[in-house]
């Protein structure tokens, strides 16, 4: 009987700790989903704002909102980040035939559905000169949804320089380049071959090709 009370206390403590852990995990998920919904709203707002939108003519007047894949936190990935030392600047080709100066800032290694992938992350040598964008990183990628559910040229992600050796890649916040909606007024970086993913990334903005008919 003397051992019964400590044993009972331990069981109660275990239950309490499990409840705390579950609550914390639930709160974390809610915060992540709220961030994705904020991204979706801001993207829609940008396309309905005459000063910001890439849309012109009927494409603008008929636009209401973007189609999105269902939010799936499986695609919010904590990747290992390795900074590229002594990175050499290079000219990244764009959709207009011109180039823009970039450098590889680092590589992200992550697992999805048990398979390991590596993506290169870049830094725009033009944008880095703009106040507020000193830590801005650019992740263009292609995957097997391109040409069906998403734009054939691939998708983009905006990131910030991580403080440690991990970086969050949330494909739920991936979007199509402006030239997917207006190829006449915009010149968009072409996704480097090294960032082609042989898997479907069913997250972020979907694409309905009503802009080139």
Image (spheres, rainbow, N blue to C red):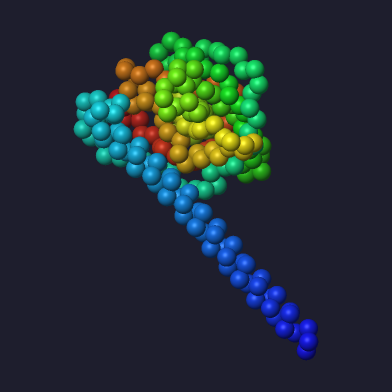
Residue 138 in picture, x, y percent from top left? 50, 27
Count of labels shown?
0
Residue 81 in picture, x, y percent from top left? 63, 33
Position above or below: 184 against 195: above
Residue at image position (47%, 41%) is 172
Residue 64 in picture, x, y percent from top left? 26, 39
Left/right of residue 8 with respect to residue 61 in the rendered view: right
Q: Foreground residue, 55 or 151?
A: 55
**Residue at the far bottom in the pictured view:** 1
Residue 195 visible in this rendered orientation of the protein: no
Residue at image position (74%, 79%) is 7
Left/right of residue 78 with respect to residue 187 in the rendered view: right
Residue 118 in picture, x, y percent from top left? 63, 31
Residue at image position (31%, 30%) is 210
Quadrant housing the C terminus: top left
Position above or below: 95 against 81: above
Q: Foreground residue, 170 or 131?
A: 131
**Residue 104, quarter of picture:** top right
Left/right of residue 137 with respect to residue 53 in the rendered view: right
Position above or below: 159 against 91: below
Q: Foreground residue, 115 or 130?
A: 130
Residue 37 visible in this rendered orientation of the protein: yes
**Residue at the far top in the pictured view:** 98
């Amino acid at each position: 009987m003397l051992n019964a009370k400590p044993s009972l206390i331990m069981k109660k403590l275990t239950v309490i700790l499990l409840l705390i852990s579950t609550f914390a995990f639930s709160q974390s998920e809610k915060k992540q989903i709220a961030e994705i919904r904020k991204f979706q709203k801001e993207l829609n707002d940008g396309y309905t704002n005459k000063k910001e939108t890439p849309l012109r003519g009927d494409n603008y007047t008929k636009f209401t909102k973007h189609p999105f894949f269902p939010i799936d936190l499986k695609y919010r990935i904590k990747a290992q980040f390795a900074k590229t030392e002594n990175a050499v600047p290079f000219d990244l080709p764009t959709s207009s035939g011109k180039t823009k100066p970039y450098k590889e800032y680092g590589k992200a290694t992550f697992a999805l559905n048990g398979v390991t992938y590596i993506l290169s992350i870049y830094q725009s040598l033009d944008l880095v000169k703009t106040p507020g964008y000193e830590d801005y990183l650019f992740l263009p990628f292609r995957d097997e949804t391109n040409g069906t559910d998403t734009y054939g040229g691939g998708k983009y992600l905006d990131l910030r320089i991580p403080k440690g050796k991990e970086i969050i890649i949330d494909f739920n916040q991936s979007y199509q380049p402006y030239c997917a909606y207006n190829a006449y007024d915009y010149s968009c970086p072409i996704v480097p071959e090294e960032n082609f993913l042989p898997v479907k990334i069913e997250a972020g903005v979907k694409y309905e090709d009503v802009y080139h008919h």
